[in-house]
Each structure stands twice: as C-alpha cells, then as structure tokens.
C-alpha cells in the first residue's frame, strides 16, 4: 500500500471519532495562511467553505462559474450569499451547451464537466497568483456514483471537507452557529442531473425542467424538488420528509396541468421522494 493511501486511511480513522470542532480545524488547516480561490455556488457546502477560508486564509476569492445547467435560483443565491459573507466574488460564463461531449450526456458526463470546471478554476487561480483552489465536496456525498471526484484530484483541486470527513449535517451545524442564511437551504445540483444518460441535453429541455421544479415548489409548498426527465414523462421527487404535502387532489390536478402545458404526456410523483443519484439506480430507463 502506498504511503499516500496509508496517510489518507489514517486521517479517515482519526476523523471518525473527532468532534465537530476538531474536524473544522482539519479543514481550516488546508487553507490556513494561504491565498485561496473558493469554487462558489452560494449553496450550503461552498458557503461553509468560504466562511472557514475567511477565518484562516490570507486572501479569499469566491469564483462562480455560470452555465445554462445552473438553476436561476442558484445563480441569484451566489450573489446574495457572497454579499452576506463580505468576500470578493467574481463570475465567469461557460458555453456548456456548446460542448458536444457534454450535451450528448454520456455516462461520464459528470467527470467531463468537473474536469473542465476544475481547469477553469485552476486557470483563474494561476492568473491571480492564488496558491490553492478548494471546493466543497463533503463526506455525505461520497456514498453514490461520483465520477467528478476523480477529475478534481487530477487537476489538483483540494476538498477540505473530505480531508476532515465532514458530513452535510455537520456543515449545516457550523452554518447555524455562524448565523448564515443558507444553513437550512435545500441541496442544489446542476440541471443536467435530471436527465438519463444518453438523453441529449438542450436549452429547451433545461428550461422545461426548471419550470417544472419551480411549479412544484409553488404548488406543493416544498423546499426540495427534482423533476426527472424521461422523454414524455416527468417524475417529480420532493423531499422525503415533505411527501405528505403532495397528498392533495387539487394540488395534484394543478401540477398535472402544468406538466402537460410544458409538453409532458404524463406527470408522476415518485413515492420514495428525493434522494441523490436516483438516475443511477438503473442502467436503463
């Protein structure tokens, strides 16, 4: 076994029994005294990472990469939360739909996308003479299919929360202690995750899915929603603890009408509710 792998396993064993404060210290040590670019979405993880960086880094720059696959609500959140943190924030646009290897939506789409994102982060960090680039992957996310994780390592992007074995609930606890507004915000993910592998992604399809999710939030009064695209069927997942909010015939009728107005023949509610990686549960539609 390599020394690097042994070191990683040793850190993991240590963090399994560590307190929240000890884990936060491990994450902070990755950034302490350095000039840092934070890959920033304005969501739970990147906000906590930015806040920690602000505590210990010599210089912090928040960078948001905008693309058509980012929900509008997430783009707005990034600007608002950056102001709340009081940190320098820059944005850059990327022509995601102009990249054939992404719009064809292959099984390794997430790897390709993360690799390109990571290269953009690294390029801008180098241009601004920043020492390291960090992103907010956490221990709770490593249980499913995560091809993007390998891409980050290949480009040299650091993941302090993984080093510290920090979980999503622990990160939320830190945000609450800091009094930051996103502490209880729902998890966000790029809209490309709503499509089965092999289904080409277009601007029209992205717009339709985003409208469907906004409608579900408004009609059902839920916080967490994913609208999964299956050709003429849309499968709506709401938070597992929010499913009772869909048990209303008038609301179901309304969401059905909206779905059909958006071009779907069938509108379904997933009885299991939202869970990450539901598109990876089967290899076929």
Image (tube, grey):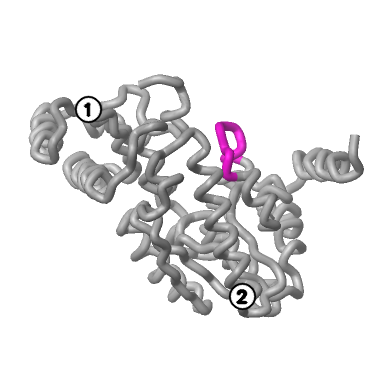
Q: Is residue 57 visible?
A: yes
User: Which residue is identified by label 2?
Assistant: 60
Whether residue 222 is situated above or below residue 125 in the rendered picture:
above
Number of residue marks: 2
Q: Position of residue 175 (x, y in %)?
A: 53, 59
Which quarter of the rendering shows the C terminus? top left
Whether residue 124 is situated above or below residue 110 in the rendered picture:
below
Q: At x 46% / y 60%, what residue is drawn?
A: 41
For discs 2 and 1, the disc positioned in front in the rendered view: 1
How many C-alpha atoms fall within 10 Å of the one at disc 2: few (<14), some, or many (≥20)? many
Q: At x 22% / y 27%, what residue is drawn?
A: 233
Q: Position of residue 74 (x, y in %)?
A: 37, 58
Q: Is residue 241 visible?
A: no
Q: Position of residue 197 (x, y in %)?
A: 41, 32
29 to the left or right of 61: right
142 to the left or right of 185: right
Q: Nearer the viewer, residue 117 or 102?
A: 102
Q: Nearer the viewer, residue 116 or 235?
A: 116
Q: Position of residue 116 (x, y in %)?
A: 54, 55
**In terms of sequence position, does the residue under pointer 2 or pointer 1 come before the other?**
2
Q: At x 8% / y 39%, what residue is drawn?
A: 261
Mark 2: secondary structure:
strand
Per the rendering, the mark at residue 233 is 1
How many C-alpha atoms fall within 10 Å of the one at disc 1: few (<14), some, or many (≥20)? some
Q: Tell me where residue 34 sits by quadrant.
A: bottom right
Q: What span is in magenta?
A: 140-148
Question: What is the CA distance from the residue labelled 2 to the residue labelled 1?
Answer: 44 Å
Whether residue 199 is situated above or below residue 207 in the rendered picture:
above
Q: Nearer the viewer, residue 271 or 285?
A: 285
Q: At x 61% / y 75%, what residue is drawn?
A: 60
Mark 1: secondary structure:
strand
């Amino acid at each position: 076994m390599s020394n690097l792998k042994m070191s990683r396993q040793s850190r993991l064993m240590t963090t399994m029994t560590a307190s929240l404060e000890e884990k936060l210290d491990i994450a902070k040590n990755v950034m302490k005294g350095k000039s840092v670019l934070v890959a920033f979405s304005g969501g739970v993880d990147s906000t906590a990472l930015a806040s920690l960086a602000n505590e210990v880094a010599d210089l912090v720059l928040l960078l948001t990469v905008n693309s058509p696959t980012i929900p509008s609500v997430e783009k707005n959140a990034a600007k608002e939360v950056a102001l709340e943190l009081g940190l320098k924030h820059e944005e850059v646009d990327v022509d995601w739909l102009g990249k054939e290897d992404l719009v064809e939506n292959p099984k390794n789409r997430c790897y390709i996308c993360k690799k390109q994102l990571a290269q953009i982060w690294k390029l801008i960090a180098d241009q601004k003479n920043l020492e390291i680039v960090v992103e907010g992957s956490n221990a709770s996310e490593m249980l499913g299919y995560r091809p993007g994780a390998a891409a980050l390592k290949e480009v040299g992007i650091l993941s302090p929360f993984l080093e510290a074995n920090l979980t999503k609930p622990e990160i939320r606890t830190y945000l609450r202690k800091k009094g930051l507004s996103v502490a209880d915000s729902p998890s966000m993910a790029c809209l490309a995750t709503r499509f089965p592998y092999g289904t080409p992604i277009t601007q029209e399809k992205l717009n339709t899915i985003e409208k469907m999710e906004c409608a579900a939030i408004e009609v059902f009064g839920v916080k967490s929603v994913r609208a999964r695209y299956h050709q003429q069927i849309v499968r709506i997942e709401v938070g597992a603890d929010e499913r009772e909010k869909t048990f209303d015939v008038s609301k179901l009728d309304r969401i059905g009408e909206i779905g059909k107005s958006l071009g779907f023949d069938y509108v379904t509610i997933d009885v299991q509710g939202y869970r990450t990686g539901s598109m990876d549960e089967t290899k076929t539609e």
